[in-house]
Image (tube, rainbow, N blue to C red):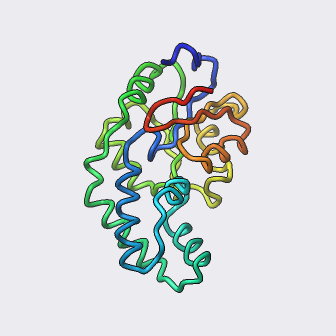
């Protein structure tokens, strides 16, 4: 798989987490679906999937405004997070991504740029063992402007001492790809943990 991409040419490999490295997106979406029903917010699974990388509070506020609804954003976010955390320990790393991470460990610096909170991301990295391979984590708590802004990925590059123009970003959403491009990085689309042909 990786031969055609020649990842050694990059200063750093930067991964989104949910839906790219790990199979957590269905858990997020299930939690969204239940919470949306409880709070009377229309739910569109495909649309929500595209918002991967944006913190829950921001998405709720955006959707409430779109639908002209008054929603307690904090209460919604707390409920959605609680439902997600009930199942967080079932998250696993996509096999092809594990292979890639292990194959390039020690050869190319790696980091993660995620829209998840630091607490949840660190929990997943510890529980899956990814923390032993990927030392740098930039979470939603570490930047003000989240994806599609470039700040998350630029911060990862900075922490890795890498030139953004020579970093490769792995992403599973359009918003994430936009963020990578805005950071002047090369981007690769990942679908269910598999690299999409360019």
Does 133 sit above or below residue 59? Answer: above
**Residue 30 drawn above or below residue 105:** below
Q: How many marks?
A: 0
State left or right for residue 70 relative to residue 126. Answer: right
Looking at the figure, which quarter contains the C terminus? Answer: top right
Image coordinates of residue 130 in percent, x first then y, are 37, 35
**x, y percentage for residue 100?**
44, 24
- Write the residue at 64% across / 39% down: 158
Q: Residue at x 26, y 47 (%)?
A: 90
Above or below, 130 against 33 in this view is above
Where is residue 39 shown, x and y percent of the image? 41, 80
> Measuring 35% from the left and 63% from the top, which residue is drawn there?
31
Seen as rendered, the residue at the extreme top is 3
- The spot of residue 136 in percent (x, y) is 50, 39
Give the quarter of the image for residue 81: bottom left
Residue at x 55% of width, y 57% of height: 51
Q: Which residue is most to the bottom? A: 70
């Amino acid at each position: 798989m990786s031969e055609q991409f020649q990842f050694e040419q990059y200063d750093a490999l930067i991964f989104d987490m949910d839906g790219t490295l790990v199979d957590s997106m269905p858990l997020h979406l299930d939690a969204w679906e239940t919470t949306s029903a409880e709070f009377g917010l229309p739910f569109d699974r495909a649309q929500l999937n595209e918002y991967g990388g944006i913190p829950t509070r921001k998405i709720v506020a955006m959707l409430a405004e779109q639908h002209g609804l008054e929603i307690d954003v904090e209460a919604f976010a707390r409920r959605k997070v609680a439902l997600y955390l009930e199942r967080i320990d079932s998250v696993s790393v996509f096999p092809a991504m594990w292979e890639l991470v292990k194959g390039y460990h020690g050869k190319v610096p790696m980091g993660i740029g995620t829209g998840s909170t630091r607490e949840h991301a660190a929990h997943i990295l510890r529980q899956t063992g990814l923390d032993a391979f990927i030392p740098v984590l930039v979470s939603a708590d570490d930047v003000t402007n989240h994806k599609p802004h470039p700040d998350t990925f630029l911060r990862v590059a900075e922490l890795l001492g890498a030139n953004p123009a020579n970093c490769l970003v792995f992403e599973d959403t359009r918003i994430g790809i936009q963020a990578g491009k805005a950071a002047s990085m090369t981007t690769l689309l990942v679908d269910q943990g598999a690299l999409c042909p360019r």
